[in-house]
Amino acid sequence: MKIIPKLALAAVLATGVGGVALTAPAVAQKKGKEQQAGGLKLSPEALKAAQAAQPVLQQKNYAAAEPLIQAVEAAAKTEDDKYIAAAMRYELESGKLFAAQQANPNAPLDEAALAKPLDALINSPSTPAADKPRYVFRRGALAFNGKQYPIALQYFTQAKQLGYNDPNLPMLIVKAKFETGDIAGGNAELESVIDQLNASGQKAPEDYYKFAIGRANKSKMVPETLAWIRKWIAAYPTAQNWRNALVIYGLQQGALATLDKNQKLDLFRLMRASKSLADQNDYLEYAQYATDKGLPAEAETVLKEGIATGKVPAGNATAKAMLTAAAAKSRQEGSLAPTEARAKAAGDGKLAALTAEAYYGQGNYAKAVDLYRTALQKGGVDANEVNTRLGIALAAQGDKAGAKAAFDAVKGAPRADLAGFWNTWLQTQA
């Protein structure tokens, strides 16, 4: 992924010196004083040399312009002389680089020759105030391309303070901070960039989020990585993005979190809710976790959904065998009413939690919610697990506020992170 474009020289940042009228008024010529050129006061020697160099530079005859500009540099005495000399040198070197890039776009460019004239232009009191911000920005780009990130950050920050407006500038500051090792600063800067874009009505590009995820993950910053993943799928909640996010989080080898079977079951439930179950492997794995948990009705429902969508081929032998077994066990399960009565009379909430799971698997979310709450009230259960599942059941009922409250009550990794993903999904629902 490439977010920041190479700033070699897509177009010449011209100084504008080519348009300066390098002619001396008659009065000034008669008096023999310093000559005036477009508001600048040049010494006679510098003016004469500049007049000779200017048309050759405008013709882009860079080989012929080189000795003429050297003459301007040699003649420069006053601040205005030195400004004209630096401006012409910068335009010459920029033009040479641009011509080289046009001739061979894939060839590496050595921009070092731009540093000296840019520094002179930035520091010259004769440089027009309106031009200084872009010279500062260009100097930052020069340092950035040369991997001198602390120097680049200094110039980019100065350009921003001077009011320079370039669409690349905010992300260049972000990347320069990351490259200097200021990961926290880069994250904060990027978050500010995204917030400003969103507040202005421009949706921040998806690549901004992916860039942040990649950099945080590369630095082994798991909480920051998870936070950026949730921001990404909140902004771009496609089924593919949801699947990628949840696989990265807890399903792939080397995932951000190590989940047990119970936690993975709840992760697959979120994949189902976000419609991000992608293929037969997803459906079969989900069904297997439900089967292992003793939830045949849920396994049966998931397999039937997979077959109905075509993601699980109807002729898949494994799926057919699992579906047959799940359907048989679901019939054997029968009514949960007697178990529910025992659960409500029990001294702790363990049976209530198990019965709530069974009700959830059957799609009876109201009963599941009631018994999850009973389990929490009686105690003796893993409150974080039960609150996660209470939130899931409430979300299935469409009770967003109740679901959020349940997810917010979940503490400690990895359950709290899993609940955080469920909360993000809630936010994306109309």
Image: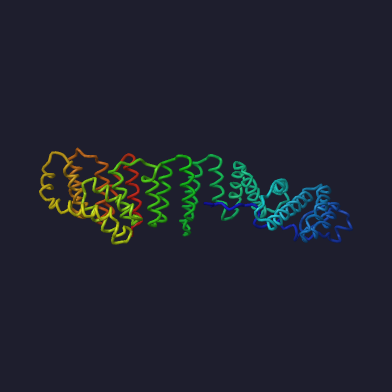
Q: Quadrant of the C terminus?
A: bottom left
Total residue callouts: 0
Q: Quadrant of residue 30?
A: bottom right
Residue 145, image x and y in percent? Answer: 63, 47
Residue nearer the viewer, 213 or 86: 213
Judging from the image, the colouring scheme is rainbow
Please give the name of the residue rendered at 15% of the width and 54% of the height, measured from the top-left corner.
331
Asked if residue 333 is positioned above or below residue 150 in the image, the reply reads: below
Residue 402, image x and y in percent? Answer: 26, 51
Residue nearer the viewer, 271 or 169: 271
Residue 251, image x and y in percent? Answer: 36, 46
In the rendered structure, the answer to whether residue 177 lies left or right of residue 97 reads: left
Asked whether residue 399 is in view, the answer is no
Residue nearer the viewer, 424 or 293: 293
Please give the name of the residue rendered at 23% of the width and 52% of the height, measured from the top-left corner.
298
Asked if residue 9 is positioned above or below residue 176 in the image, the reply reads: below
In the rendered structure, the answer to whether residue 184 lies left or right of residue 334 reads: right
Please give the name of the residue rendered at 52% of the width and 40% of the height, measured from the top-left corner.
182
Q: Quadrant of residue 39?
A: bottom right
In the rendered structure, the answer to whether residue 45 lies left or right of residue 392 reads: right
Residue 266, image x and y in percent? Answer: 29, 48
Asked whether residue 84 is in view, the answer is yes
